[in-house]
Image (spheres, rainbow, N blue to C red):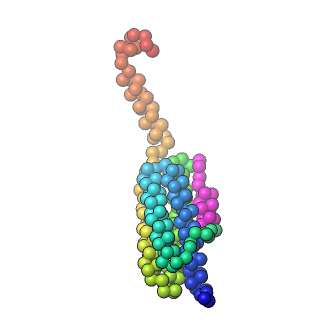
Amino acid sequence: MKSNPLEDLFHQELRSLYSAEKQLLKAWMKMSQEARHPKLRAVFQTRLRETEGQIRRLEEMASLLGKSIHSARCVGMEQMIREGESLKVADAGDAGWDASLVAAAQHLQDYEIERCCVALALACRVGQHEIEVLLEKNLKEEKAAAVRLGKVAKTLKYREPAVRERARSRREEEMCVSFPESLLWAGAF
Ligand SMILES: [Fe+2]
């Protein structure tokens, strides 16, 4: 049977998307472990769960297509993840570190949306309407995740190091005051 170039391209796009999501599984896992603010950690954990669902949907698409999508490597996503790593700033305090994670995540998120849109347009062109519906679900999640990440990033609050230091000394003073006097008299200190 003669192959259709557009269908081949669509198949290739799904394979690439599958590889991209698989790489993102590891990236979100890493970022959820690296994030210092609990709210940001939660965002990455949600992304991890959503990505698992998106991978399952892509596997469903492959069975609708009757083709394998396992043996591909999305070089674009590999580069995006590498670039994201280079954005991370280790010596900028908690707020600076988390801001660099958010910047890296936003790059990944934008790339995902772009790739999903390409696959969706191709699904429409080749008349794969069931796959189109599944891709729309993934795209909707990607867009919502990008908005959620932006919103959460704006609400993160951190204690300045000086404030933290003052709070620590206050706690230490309180501990000294609250030492039982009987212990002091007993010569324990
Ligand atoms: Fe995704």
Q: Is residue 5 left or right of residue 154?
A: right
Residue 143 visible in image: no
Note whether 31 is above or below 175 in the view shown: below
Q: Main secondary structure of the magenta part?
A: helix
Number of marks in the image? Answer: 0
Task: Say whether residue 121 is magenta.
Answer: no
Q: Residue at x 41, y 31 (%)?
A: 171
Q: Residue at x 50, y 42 (%)?
A: 161
Range shown magenta:
77-91
Q: Residue furthest bottom?
A: 2
- Observer-nearest of 155 and 77: 77
The location of residue 179, given as percent across then percent down, is 38, 21
- Observer-nearest of 69 and 52: 69
Q: Is residue 32 left or right of residue 83?
A: left
Quadrant in the rendering for residue 149 = bottom left
The location of residue 5, given as percent across then percent down, is 61, 86
Q: Residue furthest front?
A: 1
Note whether 105 is above or below 41 in the view shown: below
Task: Say whether residue 78 is magenta.
Answer: yes
Residue 10 visible in image: yes
The location of residue 106, given as percent across then percent down, is 52, 64
The location of residue 38, given as percent across then percent down, is 43, 50
Q: Which quadrant of the rendered structure holds the C terminus?
A: top left
Q: Which quadrant of the rendered structure holds the N terminus?
A: bottom right
Q: Residue at x 45, y 65 (%)?
A: 53
- Observer-nearest of 29 and 72: 72
